Structure formats: structure tokens, C-alpha cells
């Protein structure tokens, strides 16, 4: 047993510099490996964080599981430290592993010690940035048709600024009413994360845009660059009664913020059938696989 203490605690804005630095060392594609996403979802996911040497550690306090460590150094050592923490606090060691290559690393490092369960509902969808911007090809014909319907009316798109960010909060109120947030706990959690993203938008270095039709807000999107070649979309809300609003905000956000990236990460579908169909319809080029690794 390695004698050390991990000090897991709530994430704070002041943690951003050191967490960003360690995340860059791993350069993972997963949406859980960016400070902004960790920060806005911390309460919903009961997330706690710690630093061990040059590794950034995440722990779900309610579900009692860790995330695969990000950073650099002795991977065996940091995993053993996490195991010791679980043993000291009397719960089974479980790690959520993103990326097939990280699963392989864990298997090679500690052969036969883990049972792996694929978690398809939590795979991130990774798209070609160019494809989302141009929507070329037969497979995306329906998206172009929806956009053509949308642009039949006067429309505009603008980046989120200090002057217009209040419009996003106003739209959240509309979206909640439209989607019956009051009777859906998951939607309430989602909206809490969206409001937190807007509250700390500039401190988190987020990027976003607002879509209007005939002068009225019909959609907005918020995200950030999550690694060296990928833009991640964290929040996307649109008026479902406006044909083409979702495809349009998808395209415009990609055009505005992902033109210098190879990929766009649009996160997981959580096993929701309609959401899975929608995400698959944009033809992802790959997934960020997710596995639950349980110590045997």
C-alpha cells in the first residue's frame, strides 16, 4: 500500500490553470476531460477532484467511481493510490475509462485484474468539423433541406457577448416551459448546468452563438475547445417548433468556432432513442468509447 492521502474536494474556478495544464498533457477527446464541462456539471454528478503529482483525478462521490487519470507520470502508481483510497474508505474500486487505448493501457499495466463493461449509452460522438460545416453528401441531404426551410425567413447569428448573453437566459426559461422541466429531474439538472455555463461563461473561456429568426431567439449553443484538435459542444438549446433550428445552430456553431479544428465532440446520447437517432444521422467519424472497469 502506498501511504498517501488524496484530498478530493469540489472543483473551483481557481483550479482552472493547473487542471488545464494537466489535461493538455493527455489531450483526450472525451468530454469529461475539459475544465468547463467538469465545472458546470459538478453538482449534478457529485464530482470531486484531486491532484496527485502530475495527474488530475476525478471522483463521483455519490456513485463511488473514479475517472481514468489525466496528466503524465507513473500510471501504475496513481492507479494504486486510487485503489488505496477506495480500500481506506471501504468501497469497491471502480473506474470509468474513456478511450479504447486507455482500456488497453490498464489491461497491460495490471493484466487480469479488471472486469470491463462497455457503456454504449455514454460514448461521445465525434464528427468531422468540415462535414458539420459544409453538410456535403447524400447522407446529410435532409439536414440541408431543413436549413433551406429555415433560411426562407429572415435570420441572423451572432457570437455570445456580454451585451447579449441575457438573451440566452431568457431563452432557457422558454425552453424549460416548452420541455416541461418542472416534471423532469434530468432536464432540471441539464438546465442548472446551462445556467452555470452562462453565469461563468467568460471566466471559463467558453464560446457560443445565438441564432435568431425574424429577430427572435430560436436557439443558442455553448462550447469550448477540449483538446488540440477538437471543439466540444456542451450546451445546445433550440425551439423545437421552429423547423431547422437545431440543424442550423449545429452548423453555425461549427462554422464559427470549429473551422480550425479537425473534429467536433457532441457528447453522448445517454441511451435516449431519439437522441441516438439524431446523433447517428450526422454520421460520426468515431466514438470516444466508455468502459466501466471493476477491480476483481
Image (cartoon, grey):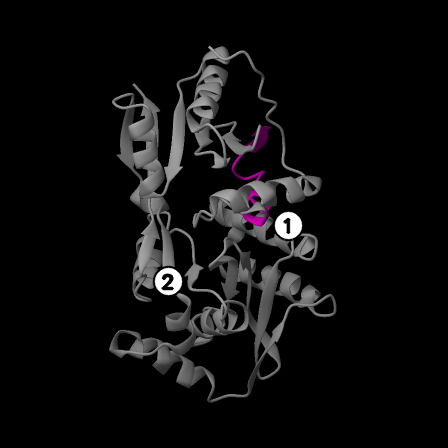
Check the image and report above or below for 114 versus 72. Answer: above
Check the image and report above or below for 274 versus 37. Answer: below
Q: Position of residue 220 (x, y in %)?
A: 56, 67
Q: 158 or 216: nearer the eye?
A: 158
Residue 276 shown left or right of residue 194 in the figure: left
Identify the image quadrant of the C terminus: top left
Residue 223 shown left or right of residue 31 in the figure: right
Q: Earlier in the sequence, mark 1 or mark 2?
A: 2
Q: Position of residue 279 (x, y in %)?
A: 34, 61
Residue 210 shown left or right of residue 73 in the figure: right
Task: Inspect the magenta stretch and tell me whether residue 164 lies in it.
Answer: no
Residue 71 shown left or right of residue 108 in the figure: right
Q: Quadrant of residue 289?
A: top left
Give the residue at x 46% y 59%. 229
Q: Position of residue 272 (x, y in %)?
A: 34, 51
Q: Quadrant of residue 113?
A: top left
Q: Is residue 290 visible?
A: no
Q: 231 or 248: nearer the eye?
A: 231
Q: CA distance from mark 1 to mark 2?
A: 26 Å
Give the structural element (helix, strand or loop) at label 2: strand
Give the structural element (helix, strand or loop) at label 1: helix
Label 1 Cα crowd, 10 Å radius (few <14 / some 14-19 / many 20+): some
Q: Quadrant of residue 273?
A: bottom left
Q: Position of residue 84 (x, y in %)?
A: 47, 15
Task: Inspect the magenta stretch and tell me whether residue 44 lies in it.
Answer: yes
Q: Which residues are magenta?
A: 36-52
The label nearer to you, 1 versus 2, is 2
Q: 181 or 159: nearer the eye?
A: 159
Look at mark 1 in the image and give the residue it sits on.
196
Look at mark 2 in the image and give the residue it sits on.
127
Check the image and report above or below for 68 versus 237. Answer: above
Amino acid at each position: 500500500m502506498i501511504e498517501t492521502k488524496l484530498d478530493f474536494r469540489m472543483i473551483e474556478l481557481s483550479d482552472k490553470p493547473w487542471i488545464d495544464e494537466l489535461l493538455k498533457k493527455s489531450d483526450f477527446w472525451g468530454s469529461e476531460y475539459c475544465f468547463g464541462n467538469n465545472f458546470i456539471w459538478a453538482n449534478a454528478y457529485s464530482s470531486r477532484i484531486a491532484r496527485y503529482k502530475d495527474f488530475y483525478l476525478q471522483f463521483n462521490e455519490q456513485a463511488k467511481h473514479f475517472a481514468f487519470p489525466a496528466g503524465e507520470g507513473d500510471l501504475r502508481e496513481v492507479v494504486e493510490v486510487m485503489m488505496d483510497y477506495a480500500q481506506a474508505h471501504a468501497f469497491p474500486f471502480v473506474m470509468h475509462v474513456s478511450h479504447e487505448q486507455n482500456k488497453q493501457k490498464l489491461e497491460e499495466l495490471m493484466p487480469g485484474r479488471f472486469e470491463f463493461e462497455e457503456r454504449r449509452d455514454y460514448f461521445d460522438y465525434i464528427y468531422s468539423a468540415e462535414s458539420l460545416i459544409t453538410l456535403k453528401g447524400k447522407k446529410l441531404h435532409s439536414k440541408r433541406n431543413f436549413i433551406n426551410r429555415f433560411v426562407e425567413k429572415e435570420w441572423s447569428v451572432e457570437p455570445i457577448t456580454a451585451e447579449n448573453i441575457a438573451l440566452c437566459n431568457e431563452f432557457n426559461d422558454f425552453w424549460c416551459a416548452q420541455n416541461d422541466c418542472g416534471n423532469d429531474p434530468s432536464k432540471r439538472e441539464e438546465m442548472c448546468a446551462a445556467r452555470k455555463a452562462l453565469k461563468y461563461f467568460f471566466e471559463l473561456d467558453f464560446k457560443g452563438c445565438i441564432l435568431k429568426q425574424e429577430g427572435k431567439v430560436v436557439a443558442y449553443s455553448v462550447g469550448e475547445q477540449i483538446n488540440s484538435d477538437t471543439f466540444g459542444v456542451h450546451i445546445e438549446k433550440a425551439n423545437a417548433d421552429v423547423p431547422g433550428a437545431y440543424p442550423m445552430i449545429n452548423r453555425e456553431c461549427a462554422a464559427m468556432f470549429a473551422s480550425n479544428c479537425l473534429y467536433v465532440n457532441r457528447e453522448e446520447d445517454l441511451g435516449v432513442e431519439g437522441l441516438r437517432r439524431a446523433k447517428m444521422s450526422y454520421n460520426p467519424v468515431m466514438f470516444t468509447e466508455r468502459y466501466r472497469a471493476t477491480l476483481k
